Amino acid sequence: MNTETYNLIDGGIQNSNLFLHMPLFDEINYLGLPEPKLRKYRAEREDLPCTMLALNIIRKEEDFLWEAVSDFVKHSVATAAMGVHGVYVFDLLTIDIHQEIQNFNQGEFSTVIMNTARKLQPGQIRLVKYSSAYGILQKLVHEDWGKITLKAAVDVFKDKPHFLDLLIKRLIKNFDFAHDPGILLLNDLSKEPLFDAADATQQERIQKVIEKQIPKSIEFLPEVYIQDRNGVREMLSNSVIK
């Protein structure tokens, strides 16, 4: 089975909370999970290819909200599977947890997934959008019965905010330094963001891990973004985008 290349921009991915504050791309392709919870994208802007690693995170104090929304999504996917024919994978790329804990309609979401699934041929993928939820749906094979495997990853950050640099280090560890530009993104879904510009210890640790872990000899240094409800910061240039 061949998997098609699908431009996520066609489905509106740049309106999601994952890409809303990111640079404007001409094309975004999803490449999967290099490790659990960590997602890889291939993008282009101004004809220049770019590799992007993104990690959705939430602080441990808000974990119960993610668990509740995750249950909503699981129920919707299970319901959708009963109305389709074939084996599918649904990868939830991002969702506004605090919005959906109030407004999520499981029946509507399952209908959107089911209607999209019925249009797919084996190997095809599409971006599914419902409210603040964005996910990739791929059909693997056709069968007389239906099965949809859900991948819905949010990393619960159990350490103190001082140690936010550990997540940046994890992104750097999984990044293939090459001749193309790159983006490393922490997408914080917390109501109370983990990043704190007034936390001197946190800021010092972040700068140290960037200086020590990112090689200076490469042509393009990767851009390191921390994104949350307050906007996005690029850590190498210390620029803030609201």
Image (cartoon, rainbow, N blue to C red):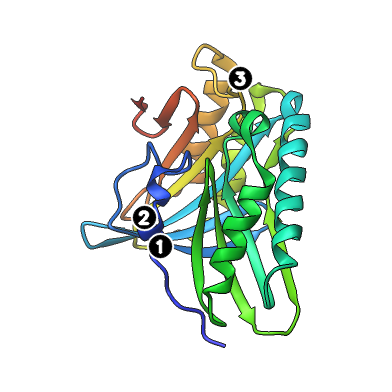
Q: Where is residue 7 in the image (x, y as percent from the top left)?
A: 38, 64
Residue shown at the point (72%, 26%) measured from the top left:
62
Q: Which of marks 3 and 2 is nearer the N terminus?
A: 3
Report which quarter residue 49 is drawn in: bottom left
Does residue 8 lie above or below 172 as drawn? below
Q: Earlier in the sequence, mark 1 or mark 3?
A: 1
Q: Do the residues labelled 1 and 2 touch (CB within 8 Å)?
A: yes
Residue ID for mark 2? 218
Q: Where is residue 157 in the image (x, y as percent from the top left)?
A: 71, 33
Label 3 residue SS: loop
Marks 1/2: CA–CA distance: 7 Å
Q: How many labels does the image show?
A: 3
Residue ID for mark 3? 192
Q: Residues within 10 Å of mark 2 (few under 14, many from 20)?
A: few
Can residue 178 be seen here? The reply is: yes
Q: Are marks 1 and 3 in contact (CB under 8 Å)?
A: no
Label 1 residue SS: loop
Looking at numbered disc 3 in the image, what kind of residue is underneath it?
Glu
Q: Which of marks 1 and 2 is nearer the N terminus?
A: 1
Q: Which of 30 and 195 is in front in this view?
A: 30
Residue ID for mark 1? 178
> What label does residue 29 carry, if any?
none
Is 234 left or right of 142, judged from the image as shown? left
